[in-house]
Image (spheres, rainbow, N blue to C red):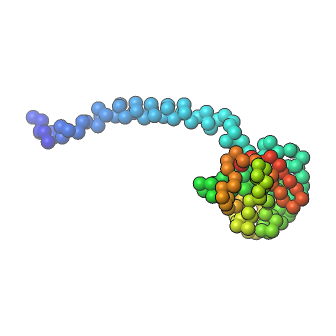
C-alpha cells in the first residue's frame, strides 16, 4: 500500500479501474466484431445444414404420406453422439396421425446404401394422447451399429407409403 501526501491510499500493483475501462471496451468491441463476421453468414444464408431432410423427396410421395397418414416429415437426424436417430414430423391431420402412436405403425427407416432396416423395436414415441394440427412431434430410434450417419440417404416406409431419398442430418 502506498499513501499519498493527501492521505489517500492505493495499491501500486492494481492499476486504477478508470485506466482499464477504455482498453476493456476496445477488446469487447473487437470480440463482438469478430463473432459477427464469423457467425452472421451461418445464421442468414441458406446452407445444407439448415435445409430440411425431405427437400430432395418426390413431392408426389410427400403428398401421398400427408394424405394417408396426416403427417409431414420435417427432419431425420443423428443425435447423442450417433447413438440415436431423431425423427421429426409435423401433424397435418390429427385423426389420421393418431395411428402413428402405435409402435407397430412406427416408420421403417431403410438405409438406401445397404438396404438394412433400422430396428424399430427400441423406438420411443415422445407423445401420448391427442395430436394437434401444426405441432411437431418426434420419435427416437436406437442407431445400433451406427447404421445411419449424417449424409446417409434413407427410405421411410409407413404402411404402404414410401418416401425415398430422405437425407439424414
Residue located farthest toward the front when viewing the structure as drawn? 114
Residue displayed at 73% across by 63% down: 119
Q: Position of residue 93 (x, y in %)?
A: 85, 58
Q: Position of 17 compared to 95: left or right?
A: left
Instruction: Classify 155 as above or below 103.
Output: above
Q: Where is residue 133 in the image (x, y as percent from the top left)?
A: 80, 57
Residue displayed at 54% across by 31% down: 37
Count of numbered labels shown in the rendering: 0
Residue displayed at 79% across by 60% down: 107
Q: Where is residue 56 in the image (x, y as percent from the top left)?
A: 80, 42
Q: Which of 76 and 132 is in front in this view?
A: 76
Q: Position of residue 115 (x, y in %)?
A: 79, 54
Q: Which of 54 and 152 is in front in this view?
A: 152
The quarter holding residue 108 reads: bottom right
Instruction: Classify 98 as above or below 56.
Output: below
Residue displayed at 67% across by 50% down: 149
* Residue 33 visible here: yes
Instruction: Classify 39 as above or below 101.
Output: above
Q: Position of 165 compared to 127: left or right?
A: right
* Residue 125 visible here: no
The quarter holding residue 146 reads: bottom right
Position of the N terminus, as image quadrant, is: top left
Q: Nearer the viewer, residue 81 or 7?
A: 81
Amino acid at each position: 500500500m502506498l499513501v499519498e501526501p493527501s492521505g489517500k491510499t492505493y495499491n501500486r500493483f492494481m492499476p486504477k479501474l478508470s485506466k482499464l475501462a477504455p482498453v476493456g471496451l476496445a477488446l469487447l468491441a473487437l470480440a463482438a466484431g469478430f463473432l459477427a463476421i464469423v457467425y452472421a453468414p451461418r445464421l442468414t444464408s441458406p446452407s445444407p445444414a439448415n435445409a430440411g431432410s425431405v427437400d430432395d423427396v418426390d413431392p408426389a410421395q410427400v403428398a401421398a404420406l400427408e394424405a394417408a397418414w396426416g403427417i409431414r416429415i420435417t427432419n431425420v437426424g443423428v443425435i447423442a453422439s450417433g447413438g440415436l436417430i431423431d425423427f421429426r414430423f409435423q401433424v397435418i391431420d390429427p385423426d389420421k396421425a393418431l395411428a402413428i402412436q402405435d409402435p407397430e405403425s412406427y416408420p421403417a427407416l431403410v438405409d438406401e446404401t445397404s438396404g438394412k432396416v433400422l430396428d424399430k423395436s427400441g423406438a420411443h414415441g415422445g407423445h401420448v394422447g391427442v395430436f394437434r394440427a401444426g405441432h411437431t412431434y418426434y420419435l427416437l430410434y436406437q442407431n445400433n451399429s451406427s447404421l445411419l450417419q449424417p449424409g446417409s440417404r434413407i427410405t421411410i416406409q409407413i404402411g404402404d407409403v414410401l418416401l425415398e431419398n430422405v437425407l439424414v442430418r
